[in-house]
Amino acid sequence: MMKEPDRKSIRVDLQVIADLIKPGSRVLDVGCGNGVLLDYLAQFKQVDGRGIELSSEGVNACVSAGLSVIQGDADTDLKDYPDQAFDYVVLSQTLQAMVAPRAVLEHLLRIGRRAIISFPNFGHWRVRLHLALKGRMPVSDTLPYQWYETPNIHFCTIKDFAVLCEELDITIERGQSLARAGAARRIGSTLAWANLFGEQAVYLLRK
Amino acid sequence: MTAPSTPPAGQPESQTAKQQDRRTDGIILPGHRVQLARTEPLHLDCGVELSDFTTAYQTYGTLNADRSNAILVCHALTGDQFAAEPHPITGKNGWWDMMIGPGKTLDTERYFVICANILGGCMGTAGPREINPATGRPWSLDFPVITIGDMVRAQALLLDHLEIEKLFAVTGGSMGGMQVLEWASLFPERVFAAMPIACAVRHSSQNIALHEVGRQAIMADPDWCGGDYLNQGKRPHRGLAVARMAAHISYLSEKAMHRKFGRRLQNRRSVTYGFDADFQVESYLRHQGITFVDRFDANSYLYVTRAMDYFDLAEKHGGVVANAFRDTPVRFCIISFTSDWLFPTEENREIVHALNAVAANVSFAEIESDGGHDSFLLDKPEFRRVLGGFLNGAAQHRGLPT
């Protein structure tokens, strides 16, 4: 497919996610923030997009921009949606902030024919090194919070995530790790490599 | 200030001009009048058939050539059709003046805004204060009990008359929001976008209780005369004023009320050890009550509060609210306010949950405001921004020029 003209520049993991979504599909973006991905998908992929966002600022910005977004909490509000209501359900950089990530993951794959999940990899070598050498919880520009104030209460590694998918009988259609520079790399048999050098991961899943 | 527009070209003039409504209090109400259900009666939920009844309405802006830019604004309990112009009785600005007008959120340069007095109301549409054609006397309590659904079906007849097949949008707060939900449920094919504000899928027990206090206040006034006061030349002003005072408290928030009045005394240095209005808040409430009776009919107050009490979307749909919206093509935007304790965010969220259950296209925002339930009548920039943004998005999808 040809690249669209005037592509907007969006966060690299959002771009990787957007590239996984077929034009014209129905998308639910869980934790959609200020709607950057939804806006991009509406503009360049003609999707029928919806969003859930916890913060009022995010919601108000989205609705004011004409996006269909509700104020809500993924931990409690996903249960309302019917089975297979969307082609894709997206959860970007939010899984680690869920109270019950496993339950959320199961809901995503119930509501959507496919789920696209991106999360920061706690197995990245910098994280490991930080913990090993400094003996303290890692704080960096990608993980900027102190342990006592972080919204990220359920960190996992790429390996952890792959194991959970197996336990839940979830099929990984495609896994990509993103290095610091933003280059996406397919996670195939190189799980250990990805787990060490991928700063974040983007997974396309189906049940 | 927008002047009420004349009906658009091609629209039957009907009775608009000739039938001015001279009320029992001698005031002549301006605006449009139309007789509806002339050939076929309106079947009310209570079982009565109502034919040839008057609806009073106002319009702002111009209907476009393909009649696709109409927005119906549904008024709340004691609101009326004078949404965006000085009120003919009180002289105050229209209740949604900040929202409707050229360049405003409901931009009358883009949209054709319609606001009709509800069935059972007292500003020109058929209700207990109007003359029963069968007897030539006011209906009073002979007027059939009205539901939110009846109000909406009557509005649908008005749209037929205006030859508007499909509304671009329908919106309203509180009881207006209930009408919006009923619109989307009864006539999903006639609504493109629905914006129910500060409302719920059912009237809660607490809200029914508050309404009952108001009704009892009216009925306890000896001048109510068992509902027959219009024929006996009396008005239950005291009862109606008390009803309004009680209700008015529920429209505000504790915080806003305390900020506005605190425990400050009214034109005195110390309490009087009596039952005068010592406190500013008492004086304010009394004023609210006294001014209300000039523009509202006591029996009508009984009818419209009852209509709200009876509202329960779940009950009408097998106990499941979502059934009211199955396969709905309507785009929804639900808005609640943080300090609203009459229709709290949690109750608004129930609408959202029901709509999510049918994977409807829905937006939902909670607006920060300490103005209580009446926040939807206040000038809240964030509220206008969210509602306007949603409306713009919907207009794009509808293919209306932006």
Image: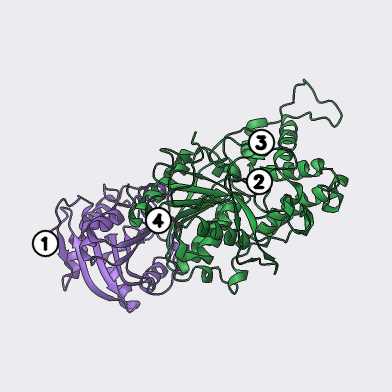
Chain colours: A purple, B green
Q: Most extreme residue toward the top, as rendered?
A: B269
Asked if marks 3 and 1 touch (Cβ < 8 Å), the reply is no
CA distance separating discs 1 and 4? 30 Å
For discs 2 and 1, the disc positioned in front in the rendered view: 2
Disc 2 from disc 1: Cα separation: 61 Å
Distance CA(mark 3)–CA(mark 1): 65 Å
Q: Is residue B231 left or right of B253 when viewed as pictured?
A: right
Which callout, 3 or 2, points at the residue further toward the start of the chain?
Answer: 3
State how far apart marks 3 and 2 are (Cα): 10 Å
- Label 2 amino acid? Met
Name the residue type under label 1: Met
Say what amino acid the circle numbered 3 marks.
Answer: Ile
Q: Nearer the viewer, mark 3 or mark 1?
A: 3
Nearest to the eye among marks 4 and 3: give it: 3
Chain letter for mark 4:
A
CB atoms of marks 4 and 2 within 8 Å: no
User: Do dots 2 and 1 share one subunit?
Assistant: no
Residue under circle 2? B123
* Residue ID for mark 1: A2
Nearer-N-terminus badge (1/4): 1
Mark 2 belongs to chain: B
User: Could you tell me if the residues under marks 4 and 3 are in contact, i.e. CB atoms within 8 Å?
Assistant: no
Residue designated by label 3: B89
Residue B316 in the figure: left or right of residue B25: left
Residue A69 is marked as 4
Disc 2 on helix, strand or loop? loop
